[in-house]
Image (tube, rainbow, N blue to C red):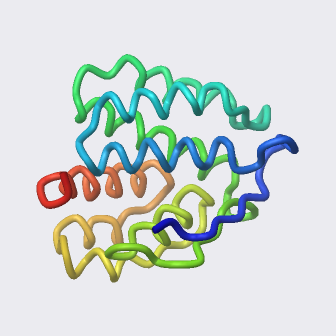
């Protein structure tokens, strides 16, 4: 079910995929509308380690996710996680996706957290408004917020 991922980020030689895998779990829990799942993944992310340059921004988003009282707040926290990842990686390093995944969400996620240019054509067919907003977004934060608005709709079809 899951694609192969490669992450070359941070100075975490013992578990280079640790923080990426935990962030992906938070995203997947958000897709399911699972607040507790987002919070559990955020706790794992908090223990997964990141490089010094991204720890502060990511830590704030993780704290927001753990304290979230509903999935909307958790969504804003996941957007903060994406933004922290993208600002740290800035298109130079980060995960790659061997598969676009359902509706292109996995490829989009890998590009967003890596700070690379995105292609939202796969999701635009399923959610035209959110896909167009994602395509038009500029800057890491705006793209992250548009992506979270998109995945927040997923739980209505994918509980």
The answer to which of 37 and 7 lies nearer the viewer is 37
Above or below 79: residue 154: below
Number of numbered callouts drawn:
0
The answer to which of 52 and 34 lies nearer the viewer is 34
Q: Residue furthest left?
A: 156
Q: Residue at x 27, y 70 (%)?
A: 131
Q: Percent from the top left, x then y, of residue 96?
A: 64, 69
Q: Residue furthest front?
A: 1
- Quarter of the image for residue 56 reads top right
Decide if residue 9 is on the left or right side of residue 116. Answer: right
Q: Percent from the top left, x then y, of residue 57?
A: 60, 31
Q: Residue at x 33, y 32 (%)?
A: 74
Decide if residue 94 is on the left or right side of residue 104. Answer: right
- Quarter of the image for residue 129 reads bottom left
Q: Percent from the top left, x then y, of residue 88?
A: 69, 47
- Quarter of the image for residue 90 reads bottom right
Above or below 16: residue 119: below
Above or below 110: residue 151: above
The answer to which of 151 and 138 lies nearer the viewer is 151
Decide if residue 135 is on the left or right side of residue 32. Answer: right
Q: Residue at x 21, y 82 (%)?
A: 125
Q: Percent from the top left, x then y, of residue 30?
A: 32, 44
Above or below 26: residue 74: above
């Amino acid at each position: 079910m899951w694609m192969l991922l490669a992450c070359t980020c941070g100075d975490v030689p013992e578990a280079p995929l640790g923080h990426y895998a935990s962030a992906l779990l938070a995203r997947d829990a958000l897709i399911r509308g699972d607040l507790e799942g987002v919070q559990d993944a955020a706790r794992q992310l908090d223990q997964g380690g990141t490089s010094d340059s991204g720890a502060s921004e990511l830590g704030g988003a993780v704290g927001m996710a753990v304290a979230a009282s509903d999935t909307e707040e958790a969504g804003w926290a996941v957007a903060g996680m994406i933004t922290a990842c993208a600002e740290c990686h800035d298109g130079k390093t980060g995960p790659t996706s061997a598969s676009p995944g359902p509706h292109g969400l996995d490829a989009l996620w890998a590009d967003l957290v890596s700070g690379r240019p995105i292609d939202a054509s796969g999701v635009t067919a399923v959610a035209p408004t959110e896909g167009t907003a994602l395509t038009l977004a500029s800057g890491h934060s705006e793209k992250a917020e548009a992506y979270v608005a998109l995945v927040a709709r997923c739980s209505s079809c994918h509980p």
